[in-house]
Each structure stands twice: as structure tokens, then as C-alpha cells.
Image (tube, rainbow, N blue to C red):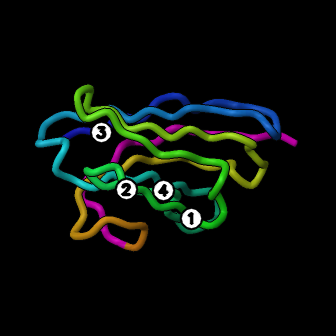
Amino acid sequence: VQLAESGGGSVQSGGSLILSCTASGWMYSSNCKAWFRQAPGKEREGVAAIDSDGSALYADSVKGRFTISLDNAKKMLYLQMNSLKPEDTAMYYCAADALGCGLDYEYNYWGQGTQVTVSS
């Protein structure tokens, strides 16, 4: 099982980015998938999670600004990030396969991360 993120970069406050996560090696459609982030000196936090039927949930800090989506046919997971703020600066990771679907579960598979930097 392998996950690989892409799409990170540097953007000014108020800008947008789309993160992508490609997956291989397992029955992609059967698992919950999520995005997490970790800023320097801070603990990792859940950003958004999506079930196989498309049901999504978000951290309060990103609600209304971020959208998680998936394309099962392409085995791709996305995170559309709008109205970015400097506090969104972090390494972003995609994750898959947990006992439940949410931001408080332990996920078994992780990507290497992609850096998002938002300047004011």
C-alpha cells in the first residue's frame, strides 16, 4: 500500500491550492481516507475525512474553506483549499484505512507529505 501527495506550494493569504493523493496496492474504494497536517512545533491535526460513500467531515478550523473529495475510478483523493490563511501553513499528509471514519481514528497508511506555506 502506497500513498503519495502532490500539489503543495507557496501561496499568499486568501489564495487557493489543490492537494492530490494517489493510492495503490489495495481495494481503494473500501476505506476511509483523510487529510492531516502538522505545523512545526505542533501536534498533527486532522483536517478532513471522507467515507467510501462520499460522506465528509471537517475540522472546525477549515469548515467552509476546504473540500475533500475522492475519485475511486482514478484512486485519487483531493483537498481543495480556498481562502488560505498563514495558520494553514503545515506539512499535509493523506492517510487511509482506519477502524472508523473520522479525524480521531488511527490510520494505517500514510503518505510522505506535501508542504503548504501561506504568507501574509
The residue carrying pointer 4 sits among few (fewer than 14), some (14 to 19) or many (20 or more) residues within 10 Å by Cα, namely: many
Q: Is residue 61 left or right of residue 106?
A: right
Q: Residue at x 52, y 61 (%)?
A: 58
Residue toward you, 79 or 4? 79
- Disc 4 marks which amino acid? Ala
Please state, as top left, top right, bottom left or bottom right, where the C terminus lies in the image: top right
Front of the two marks 2 and 1: 2
Disc nearer the start of the sequence (3/1): 3
Is disc 2 surrounded by few (<14), some (14 to 19) or many (20+) residues within 10 Å?
few
Q: How far across and how far down the image is residue 26, in percent?
A: 12, 41
Q: Look at the numbered disc 1 and give the secondary structure of its residue.
A: loop
The N terminus: image quadrant = top left
Q: Magenta span covers which residues?
A: 105-120
Give me the disc on residue 3.
3
Q: Estimate the x, y position of residue 31 in percent, counting from the top left.
A: 21, 53
Q: Secondary structure at mark 4?
A: strand
* Residue named by callout 1: 59
Residue carrying label 2:
55
The residues bearing labels 1 and 4 have C-alpha atoms spaced at a distance of: 6 Å
Q: Position of residue 43 (x, y in %)?
A: 56, 68
Q: In this figure, which residue is indicated by the disc labeled 4?
A: 48
At label 2, the amino acid type is Ser
**Closer to us: 16 or 3:** 16
Q: Looking at the picture, which amino acid does disc 1 mark? A: Ala
N-terminal label among 1 and 4 = 4
